[in-house]
Amino acid sequence: MFYAPDVSLYSERGSYIPSKAPVFYNPKMSLNRDVTVCVLQAYSEEAGRKLRVCVPMAGCGVRALRFMLETDSVESIVVNDINPAAFSLIKKNFELHGLKDRAFICCEDANTLLSSFASKGDRFDLVDLDPFGSPAPFLESAVRALKPKSAMLCITATDLPLLCGSQPRACLRRYGSMPFKGEYCHEVALRILIAHAVSVAAKHDYALQPALSYYFGHHVRVYFKGRLGAKMADEKLEKIGYLVHCDHCLSRRLIRGLPAPDITRRCPECGKETRIAGPVWCGPLQNEDFLRRVVKVAERKIEKEETLELLAQLLEEANAPPLYYEIHRMCSAARVPCPPIEKVIEALRGMGFSAFRTHFSAISVKTDAPPMKLLALLREFV
Ligand SMILES: C[S@@+](CC[C@H](N)C(=O)[O-])C[C@H]1O[C@@H](n2cnc3c(N)ncnc32)[C@H](O)[C@@H]1O
Ligand SMILES: [Zn+2]
């Protein structure tokens, strides 16, 4: 139980608009909070200790409250929001649960707050950046506030249209990356966000590696494990590169290498001109062992089917090839009706390829089959 704005008071045409409420609260982000509760618990169990946590943009405080009430992982917690009304509500919520003395509650700009915790001895085991829109303006100070030996950084980005190519200039400005507009843009959005955070952290000799990441609804979310180390930060940078996509034959590849790998603009499959996007993260999106731990915690703690299903799906596709194929798009290119996705997966596996469903899209498949083979297979279903 917690105090939050009455959603019925801030609706337009029957839909609640969280940004209209005096204090931010979005019931639709409960999956994000569910996963974070499980990640916090799993990370603490793995580390064998309780954690020092910071929630710099806490809204009404529901996330921080859940950390305290639903895990036994918090040693100390800093809960902050720049909005004075949110600050008051956070205090009220922590009082309601008799937790006010166990939290340091503040009303600061997140960058100012995080910078004030950047010195040795004050830093955090886990920082959770959950802003309006992009976490980019807060990444640098968040990284500086992470413990050097090992820490976790959680970031949400809700500026998905921008990451998916609606405003390429703005994406370049905010993330230093050219976005990709196309049927698998949500995976590319996630990979742009990861590449950007890894690069920002590397400036501070801090190495970040995604331990769990996903796309859901109108946001992408990444949980990074990190530690200080110039050599390790260099190794992470080596996993950044570019996406090369051919609109003609639909082939797609990730090519590692910064600052500028040797990319010919001609498609190696069909010779037509390709599109290039990036920098993007070319490494794995999940750490399978960690994800398995999170799934186990979720099975104990979470009842919501949607959250459990997402985590189970992430585990299933943890080692799947990157860059999914949307079957509708492929069928339209092949000029054939769409077969059921399970049949496509079965047939691909029968041909010796790997094939997985993906959480990114219910009508897509992740496979190492080349697009020509996939198109030929789809034609055979007719
Ligand atoms: C998306 S909401 C956070 C929701 C919350 N984490 C949750 O799970 O319910 C973003 C919050 O960031 C706060 N905010 C915006 N700019 C900020 C800044 N520069 N420093 C600190 N808080 C900020 C807003 O007041 C808002 O409450
Ligand atoms: Zn091509």
Image (cartoon, rainbow, N blue to C red):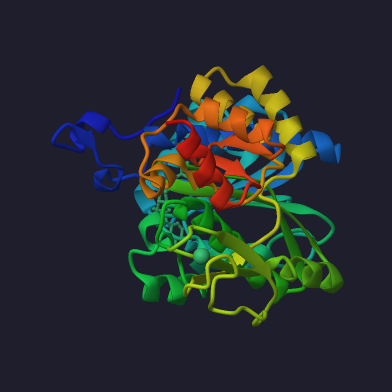
Indicate whether 249 appears above or below 341: below
Q: Is residue 319 left or right of residue 358?
A: right
Residue at 46%, 39% in the rendered image = 379
- Residue placed most toward the observer, 108 or 56: 56
Residue 134 showing in the rendered view: yes
Q: Position of residue 167 (x, y in %)?
A: 34, 69
Q: Going by the picture, which residue comes out furthest to the left?
A: 13
Residue 364 visible in this rendered orientation of the protein: no
Direction from residue 105 to residue 24 in the image, left or right: left
Quadrant assignment for the C terminus? top left
Percent from the top left, x then y, of residue 292? Answer: 74, 31
Instruction: Specify the quadrant that holds the N terminus.
Output: top left
Along the viewing direction, whichever of 382 and 325 lies nearer the viewer: 382
Residue 173, percent across and down?
44, 77
Query: Nearest the camera: 11 or 324?
Result: 324
x and y, in percent, of residue 132 in the image? 40, 55
Examine the image and state in which quarter residue 172 appears. bottom left
